[in-house]
Amino acid sequence: SEYLIGMDFKKADSYTYEIINKLIKGKTDKKPEETHRFLGAMGPKGQVSFYDELTSNIANRYIIKGRPGTGKSTLMKKVGAAALISGYNVEYYHCSFDPDSIDMIIIPEISSAILDGTAPHVVEPQVRDNVIDMFSCINTDLVKEDEEPILSIWAEYKGQIEMARGKLAYIYELREELKRYYRKATDSNMVNALRIRIENTLIQMK
């Protein structure tokens, strides 16, 4: 990442340890569980993420703002690791573009979530949210020296994303067209009879 050039990693680490000390209070005796899921995916209408649905009952939300390569995923991995060591369950939500990268962690027992609120899954902070500003860890003077390649890469990135969305939209239309043909040729009475046989078989298995 071009932003690594101007990155202050000590400052980023200080944010990480501050959050760990704030959230992780003591240890539990139980063996913790970790789960791994994808947060969302690119679809025919664009990027689909489930931040709101997954965090609707979470009391403490930390939203990270920052450019690619500024330590957002690393911060979440370190907080998640600290929580596991202390005996708390951790849910990891991976990026569909880069499965090695984390877009969100949830620690259910302390009703806390940390999430990446930047494009392509922008989350604007609400009153209840805390903001972690990774922009402040960048030396903007150094980054400005590479402004031209950065802007060029961003333009190419956005163009490729839109191209991918267009391809998925076309595939979706083809699938819908196939469904119309098969639906027209389907005998609904035979389908219903098959459904009844399966239901009766399952009832007998109880």
Image (cartoon, helix red, strand yellow):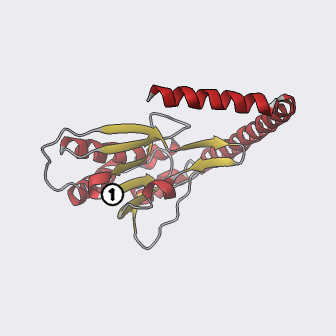
Question: Is 37 placed above or below 124 here?
Answer: above
**Which residue, as the protein is rendered here, is positioned at the far bottom?**
127
Q: Please determine whether, in this image, residue 109 is positioned above or below residue 168.
A: below
At mark 1, the secondary structure is strand
Using the rendered image of the protein, determine whether residue 117 is visible from the camera's viewpoint.
Answer: no
Answer left or right for 36 relative to 45: left
Q: Which one is in front, 44 or 187?
A: 187
Quadrant location of residue 74?
top left
Q: Quadrant of residue 60?
A: bottom left
Residue 139 percent across, percent down from the top left: 43, 55
The picture places residue 160, in percent across and down from the top left corner, at 70, 39
Using residue 100 as the reference point, say whether residue 180 is left or right of it: right
Residue 100 in the figure: left or right of residue 150: left
Residue 41 appears at what percent x and percent y? 59, 41
Say how many tags the image has: 1
Residue beneath the point at 63% across and 27% down: 197
Characterize the local packing of mark 1: few (<14), some (14-19) or many (20 or more) Cα atoms within 10 angstroms. some
Provide residue 147's location: percent of width, then percent of height: 59, 51
Q: Amino acid at mark 1?
A: Ser
Q: Is residue 146 visible?
A: yes
Residue 165 or residue 153, whichever sits in front: 165
Kindly identify which residue carries mark 1. Answer: 112
Question: In this rendering, is residue 63 above or below 88?
Answer: below
Q: Residue at x 80, y 37 (%)?
A: 176
The residue depicted at 34 percent of the width and 42 percent of the height is: 77
Quarter the C terminus occupies: top left
